[in-house]
Image (tube, helix red, strand yellow):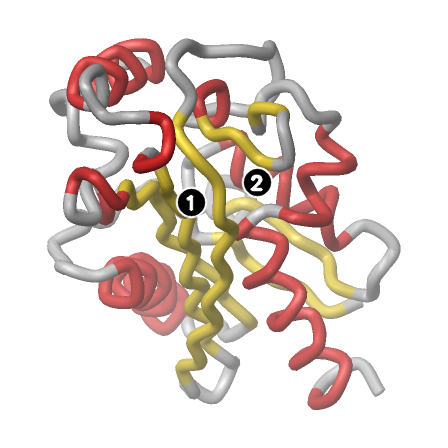
Amino acid sequence: MTKLILATNNKNKLREIREMLAGTEIHVISQREAGIDLDAEETGTTFAENAAIKAQAIRTVMQERGESCYILADDSGLSVDALDGAPGVYSARWAGEDATDADRIEKLLTEMRDVPDGQRGAHFACVMCLITPDGEQLLFTGTVEGTIMREPRGENGFGYDPVFAYEGCSFAEIPAARKNTVSHRHNALAQVEDWFRKHVLD
């Protein structure tokens, strides 16, 4: 098995990525399971910059230990057409540092209150940064298009999922197994998996 450290403290991201890579020869462990307790400050202005910051922070710790392995970080968020791409890279902090998912959704729906149905387009984007044991840094990008609903629906998912409409349902209404085949995170991770199959697993 090839060990891959996931540079995140987000349990939902960890669960989704583990589910997506289940059945492969890639063994995903969290940074905490690797004995690393840090939360890198996301100072970048793009998803790619933030993903790289998080991955490099874990690599620095591993280098200090004299260890090396594959490291993966992702940065993702929601970009709304009518809001000129906001909240974008600030998706998690848009409603304040200590805001809950419900707070973020409430802010989004308030901002979108007067936007007509035909102008509520949005997309989720995910950029994954993979660092190899020899320090090579690779970026993979995935997106999924949808629209912003007028009220939350569904009990699954997290973040803005309850108000992101995809093929008639919110991302919080579709089963996790279905979401994991169409989401922005899946679309980026599929490229990561393909890279592993071409360069490591064969």
Q: CA distance from mark 2 to mark 1?
A: 7 Å
Q: Position of residue 78 (x, y in %)?
A: 34, 41
Q: Are marks 2 and 1 in contact (CB under 8 Å)?
A: yes
Question: Which amino acid type is marked by label 2?
Answer: Leu
> Does residue 99 appear in the picture of this structure?
no
Judge left or right: residue 191 versus residue 200.
left
Q: Position of residue 119 (x, y in %)?
A: 31, 37
Report the amino acid beneath label 1: Thr
**With respect to residue 80, does 198 lie above or below?**
below
Point out residue 74 in the picture as x, y percentages from the top left corner: 42, 55
Give the residue at x 62% y 53%. Answer: 186
Q: Nearer the viewer, residue 155 or 193?
A: 155
Up-down relation of residue 18 to residue 134 (above or below): above
Q: Is residue 97 above or below residue 167?
A: above
Does residue 46 appear in the picture of this structure? yes
Say which of 79 and 148 sits in front: 148
The quadrant where residue 90 appears: top left
Measuring 26% from the left and 45% from the top, which residue is drawn there? 81
| Residue at the spot of label 1 | 8
Q: Say which mark, if any, is on residue 14.
A: 2
Tell me: 41 left or right of 79.
left
State left or right for residue 197 relative to residue 17.
right
Could you tell me which quadrant the N terminus lies in? bottom right
